[in-house]
Image (spheres, rainbow, N blue to C red):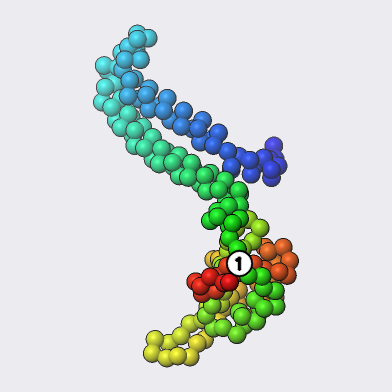
Amino acid sequence: MEMRKSESVDKQLSYKPAIIELVELSATSLFTIYRIQILSFFGIHMRKFCLVDKLLCCVMMFLMLYFFDQLILDFFNVHEKRKKLKGDKRGCAELKGKQYTLDEISKMLRESDIIEIDIKTSTDIITIGASSDCEQDGWKFFDKSYYIEDKEYGLEQEKQLLDDIRYMCGGESITVLKIDGIKVK
């Protein structure tokens, strides 16, 4: 059965699978801890397999600790995805900036060897910029590249960079919040 994309996104944003896993993990932990009392209640005695029983329980407890750690990470991942979806990640709805055209942004990126610009999109704040390398004792920059967050673009990919910025910002007008860490007024 093939899952539709919307169902997959809903599952990624839901705490339900993590809560079900937490209940299962808790029930397994309680059974492992109180196994002798539970089994003896039903008339099953483990005297013959005591050593094997203890070894299996130790392995089970270590596995449960590992799965509990993964479960905590799942809760945090769902929380971050929900927070990002709301679009108010860093209070970007209230932030004001200065409007620049895409051509002005392109000119700043081309003319600067190193620059970092924080721009506001419809849902988030992203960082774009240009970076270059330089010798340890020299002032000459080389190997210039552009970036959007963690994605890098070479000099020959400037058009792709601008298309991606246009797509993220929804047009030619871009709200700039900071340039090189300084708020724009």
Looking at the image, which residue sits at the far right?
Answer: 171
Numbered-mark total: 1
Amino acid found under the numbered disc labelled 1: Gly
Q: Nearer the viewer, residue 149 or 172?
A: 172
Res 42 visible:
yes
Tell me: 109 left or right of 60.
Answer: right
User: Looking at the picture, how far across and down is residue 36, in whole percent?
Assistant: 31, 17
Instruction: Work out whether 42 lies above or below 49.
Output: above
At x 42%, y 25%, the residue is 27
Viewed as shown, does residue 135 lie left or right of 131? left
The crowd level at tag 1 (other Cα within 10 Å; few <14, some 14-19, many 20+) is some
Q: Residue at x 54, y 83 (%)?
A: 113
Residue 99 is situated, as x and y percent measured from the top left of the image, at 66, 70
- Quarter of the image with the N terminus is top right
The secondary structure type at the circle numbered 1 is: loop
Q: Residue at x 61, y 52 (%)?
A: 87
Q: Determine which quarter of the picture holds residue 162.
A: bottom right
37 or 73: which is nearer to us?
73
Whether residue 64 is situated above or below residue 82 in the rendered picture: above
Q: Position of residue 59 (x, y in %)?
A: 33, 34
Residue 81 at x, y = what percent? Answer: 56, 48
Regarding residue 116, the answer to whether it shows in the image is: no
Which residue is label 1 attached to? 97
> Which residue is found at the position 51% from the left and 30% from the top?
20
Residue 147, picture quadrant: bottom right
Locate the C terminus by quadrant: bottom right
